[in-house]
Image (spheres, helix red, strand yellow):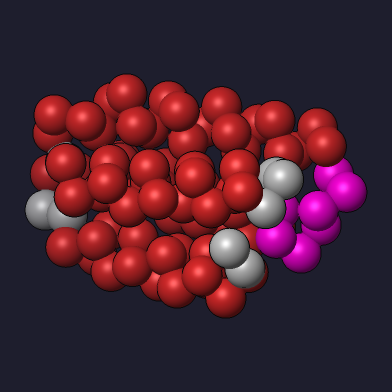
Amino acid sequence: MSQKTLRSQLEELKAEIHTLEARHNEARKRLDALVSAIEHQIENTDDKAHRQTVREDIREFMNEFETQHPTVMGVLDKISLTLSNMGI
């Protein structure tokens, strides 16, 4: 999988974030920060400390959103797999 695939998945995640209801404003902010962190990791693949943080953040969101936002969770799952396949 390539950066192109990952960027496409990030765009899909951004679209899903946009559809979250206003009552999930805090989740939106945290997801936006996660997207920024993933984008940073794509550009800085040698930043191993940041890489670990990104993986932990993705796992945390997946656990949190599994029941509340299954579509967001599905996109995060795809992103996690893509990052893993890229060695990130």
Residue 62 sits above or below residue 9 on the image: above
Residue for point 51% across, 70% down:
5
Residue for point 42% across, 65% down:
9
Please give left or right for residue 7 compared with residue 47 in the image: left
Taking depth in this image into account, of 29 and 41 the one nearest to the observer is 41
Residue 65 placement (x, y as % from top left): 24, 33
Please give left or right for residue 16 compared with residue 1 in the image: left
Residue situated furthest right in the rendering: 46
Q: Quadrant of the C terminus?
A: top right
Residue 52: which quarter of the image?
top right
Taking depth in this image into account, of 24 and 10 the one nearest to the observer is 10
Residue for point 57% across, 76% down:
4
Q: Is residue 45 magenta?
A: yes
Residue 30 sits above or below residue 18 on the image: above
Residue 41 placement (x, y as % from top left): 71, 53
Please give left or right for residue 42 compared with residue 11 in the image: right
Residue 38 in view, yes or no: yes
Q: Quadrant of the N terminus?
A: bottom right
Residue 33 in view, yes or no: no
Residue for point 81% across, 53% down:
45
Residue 48: which quarter of the image?
top right
Please give left or right for residue 35 compared with residue 27 in the image: right
Residue 80 placement (x, y as % from top left): 49, 43
Taking depth in this image into account, of 23 and 14 the one nearest to the observer is 14
**Magenta segment, which residues?**
41-47
Residue 33 placement (x, y as % from top left): 51, 49
